[in-house]
Image (cartoon, rainbow, N blue to C red):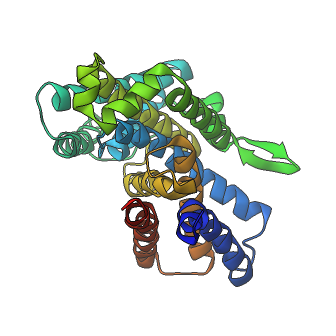
Amino acid sequence: MTLRDYAIRYGFIVLLFGLIAYFAIAADGFVSPQSAVFIFQSVAITGVLALGVTATLVVGGFDLSIGSVATSAMMAAAYVMVVLEQNVVVAVVVCLLIGAIVGLINGWLIVYMRVPDLLATLGMMFLLVGLQRIPTEGRSIATGMTMPDGSVANGKFADAFLALGRHRFDFFIPNLIPVSVVVLIVLAVLIWFFLEYTRFGRMMYAVGSNERAAELAGAPVKAYKIWAYVISGVFASIGGILLAARLGRGDIASGNNLLLDAVAAALIGYAVLGAAKPNAFGTAVGALFVGILLQGLTMMNAPYYTQDFVKGVVLVVALVFTFALSGRGRR
């Protein structure tokens, strides 16, 4: 292997450990259990959404609606339990159905209506942003709130539901690993195995690599693409469930940065171990990188408006490693 090959394959991992070492020195308290918990919590929701984006990238698509799907699921969970006073099972099922239906509509628009994926999912994003505000006239949902019709919402979040976002497992030290991180790990392993070792997953890669060739080989290309968006929608709704469980309310503005962070994690995943393709392992590492970066900048008191700039720089560097260097090597 040449030096360039090593840089492409291991450069991002070196960058990740270098970032950890830098923040450990420059930010007081970065290497602490409390900091680890904050990183894990931020990584979990971002990572789940990013895994959904990865599924659409595999088939050559892209889903811009994941942030609004997650926020809609969060608002739906709050509405079902606080306003309708239903149990946790009903709330979770409603959220998952929202994700699946939105994914199905996105896939239908893209595959059968031939709307470009960016335009279809962008339109869905705006539709959901407006729709989730209608039941409460744009207000967040919490126990005791007054509804538009004058009634009072007396329901509350079930303890079992809140545990999804707040309970922590012991790992060497007490209360270190949040439940949401376990959910992320399980989903990451499942989607990794699905994409890498099942016929369905390999055919999704084939569709993304050369849709026409896959169609000539007899693959049901349209079905694979639709399923990719359904997976993305369901994963986004799971992220919304975890967010609602962590906040304990339906906060209308809490999902503003979910889309950017999830997309950054998914695209950074291209650079991990020189994969040069969307992959679940790289996406999980990308989410961890974003979480470490934001936690470190926050602990160094970096202005909030610089964080997106730094994330953009990191993303550009990662994509240069992935495409420019590897492309030059192939030529």
- Residue furthest toward the bottom? 26
Q: Position of residue 326 (x, y in %)?
A: 43, 61
Residue 125, by quadrant, is top left
Q: Position of 240 compared to 125: left or right?
A: right
Task: Say which of 3 and 22 sits in front.
Answer: 3
Residue occupying image coordinates x 57% and y 61%:
289
Task: Tell me which residue sits at (40%, 59%) in the image.
Answer: 330
Judge whether 261 appears above or below 52 on screen.
below
Q: Position of residue 197 (x, y in %)?
A: 55, 26
Which of the image's four quarters has the C terminus? bottom left
Residue 292 seen in render = no
The percent coordinates of residue 324 (x first, y second) are 38, 66
Quarter of the view holding residue 218: top left
Foreground residue among 60 and 98: 60
Residue at image location 46% in from the left, 53% down from the top: 270
Q: Is residue 172 above or below residue 59?
A: below
Residue 237, quarter of the rendered image: top left
| Nearest to the observer: residue 4 or residue 38 | 4
In percent of width and height, residue 248 lies at 55, 42
Residue farthest along the right direction in this orientation: 172
Q: Measured along the vertical axis of the image, is residue 219 above or below residue 42?
A: above
In the image, what residue occupies the spot 40% across and 75% down?
A: 309
* Residue 316 as seen in the image, left or right of residue 211: right
Quarter holding the N terminus is: bottom right
